[in-house]
Image (tube, rainbow, N blue to C red):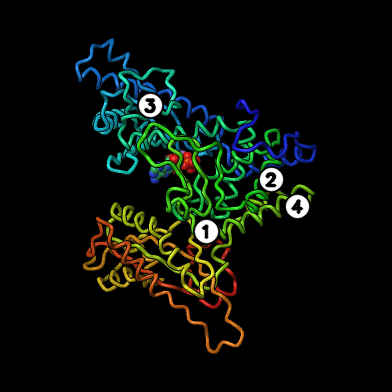
Amino acid sequence: TTDRGFLGVTPPIATSESNEREKEVTVTLMDELRRQNTFESEEEARKREIVLGRVASLVKKFVRTVSMSRGLSEAAATAAGGKIFTFGSYRLGVHGPGSDIDTLCVVPKHVSRDDFFEVFEPMLMEMEGVSEVSGVPDAYVPIIKAKISGIPLDFLMARLALSSIPDDLSLRDDTLLRNLDERCVRSLGGSRVTDEILRLVPNVQVFRDSLRCIKLWAQRRAIYSNVNGFLGGVAWAMLVARICQLYPNAIAGAIVSRFFIIMYRWSWPQPVLLKQIEEGPLQVRVWNPKLYPADRSHRMPIITPAYPAMCSTHNVTASTQMIMTEEFKKAADIVDKVIVGKAAWSELFSKHDFFHKYRYYLQVIASTGNADLQIKWAGTVESRIRQLVMKLEYVDSLTLAHPFIKGFEQILYCLTDEEVRLVAQGEISDAVLKRKKEEIEGKEGGGVVYSTTFYIGLSIEPKQAGAVGPRRLDISYPTQEFTKLVRVWEKFDESSMSIVVQHIKSSALPDYVYDAGERPQKLVQKRA
Ligand code: 3AT
Ligand code: MN
Ligand code: MN
């Protein structure tokens, strides 16, 4: 708590303790979260600690090795230190079984980023129990992914302007960022933000339990995804943290209930802040809508608490904002019923109805003939989908363009070149969808096509009374603009990558978008 006696940019709304009923529903909420398998086992938790211990030693060994190769004595090389910090869901204490451990490796100034990929990565590969090591040195935030004893880890690195990294180093001091490479500043960001969030909530356990509930709800309702214009893990964490600040003595059941009501009524674009935005020692922009028009365009700004303050919700569009607001309302109604005993928590976590909700859908199909290339191409297309959504929002008769949060991947085995051509154009027949790899082996012509399909649900304005003829929906302009936009990607290659945007009726949705037994019955008959 600060010298003003509270955490946050305003005083709390209420400082009262939770009542008996709120305590009861907190117990049933935690039971439901366990039933939904959101917690890892004690065995897995112990395994993670062992893995982290081994990683911490490896980072020290890495720093020592590089230090000695730079001519430092053995004693000086050992004193150079090296330290790991975790961030992401593991650091927040809301990870589930199978979550990764996001790990930042902090090294002294004489250890370079090249060393991280040329020395640390091979050391990692040699470690016992390690698999699937893959480094991406040229990413915006360079990263090494690996699995140790079956636990996935993401490794980032930051090189500080210090000659040694002591075990008790803290990353809180903003002046540490001075004279650092931008990639190091970005890599430090995740850890500094998570630590700051934990410092800014009045009760960490209440925050964790509440966030675990909100994360599960957002995932089930298909509104957990930063790239697609919804909110990512950090943004959801900051929203929950703000509600915790407003009710410092409330327990999880009460926080969750207030969360939905307050978020439903929030007067956007008023930002959600966990503390006042501060200036700092770098020549970087700090979020400021008074100064920067780009920041003024943020519809639901949720601002990170560590310097340099940034908006974590840059991708939100008019459509995704509407969808999230509607979900806040629905959830608030369910939680109201839970509190009076007329609903169970499980209702809050019911699956989304995206593929039942709209009459028309857009399919955005990205395909290539190569698995590695497909990951990059599909990722590029996905990261531009919000641009398509924004263009669609300008179409008169469209009230909403609802992007689904994940793409559906297919490997298609084509018998002929003609089939390959059709598949690349988005004409994927049932025969091709069902064909097995063995059926094309040893055959001339045809080949394998990797395709990823993204869906956008379209809500069309009802026809005006007295209007003549069917309502025509013309989306050729936004879709053409969108395909042009993805083709200007610097690595785009006409001969190996294709992109198709087409609209289909809901009855033509493929079976793979539904769980077993989920497909509306009438439609199944019509198709048969
Ligand atoms: P999980 O439990 O792991 O699913 P999480 O919140 O830890 O949830 P991630 O591991 O995907 O999620 O991400 C952790 C943080 O890493 C969040 C963000 O600060 C950073 N991050 C994630 N993806 C990227 C990315 N593509 N580029 C840069 N930073 C990223
Ligand atoms: Mn993670
Ligand atoms: Mn991760």
Callout 4 environment at 10 Å: few (<14), some (14 to 19), or many (20+)? some
Q: Amino acid at mark 3?
A: Leu
Q: Which residue is mark 1?
A: 320
Q: Which residue is mark 2?
A: 258
Residue 385 x, y percent position in the rendering = 41, 60
Question: The residue under label 2 is which amino acid type?
Answer: Arg
> Reading the chain from its start, which is encountered first: label 3 or label 2?
3
Q: Of 50 and 66, which appears nearest the observer?
A: 66
Q: Gap between marks 4 and 1, in whole Å?
A: 26 Å
Crowding at mark 3 (Cα within 10 Å: few <14, some 14-19, many 20+): some
Q: In the rendered view, would you say 520 is above or below 224?
A: below
Q: Badges 4 and 2: C-beta atoms under 8 Å apart?
A: no
Q: Name the disc covering residue 176, or none.
A: 3
Q: Position of residue 526 (x, y in %)?
A: 54, 78
CA distance for labels 4 and 2: 13 Å
Compare marks 4 and 1 and give the one earlier in the sequence: 1
Question: Disc 4 vs disc 2: which is toward the camera?
Answer: 2
SS at circle 3? helix
Q: Are marks 4 and 3 in contact (CB under 8 Å)?
A: no
- Residue 426 in the image: x percent, y percent? 36, 70
Q: Sequence-wise, which precedes: disc 4 or disc 2?
A: 2
Please report contact status of discs 3 and 1: CB closer than 8 Å, yes or no.
no
Residue type, numbered disc 4: Lys
* x then y, percent, for residue 372: 29, 51
Tell me the element at label 1. Answer: helix
Residue on which disc 4 sits: 337
What is the three-letter code of the residue carrying label 1? Thr
Question: Real-space Cα distance between discs 4 and 3?
Answer: 49 Å
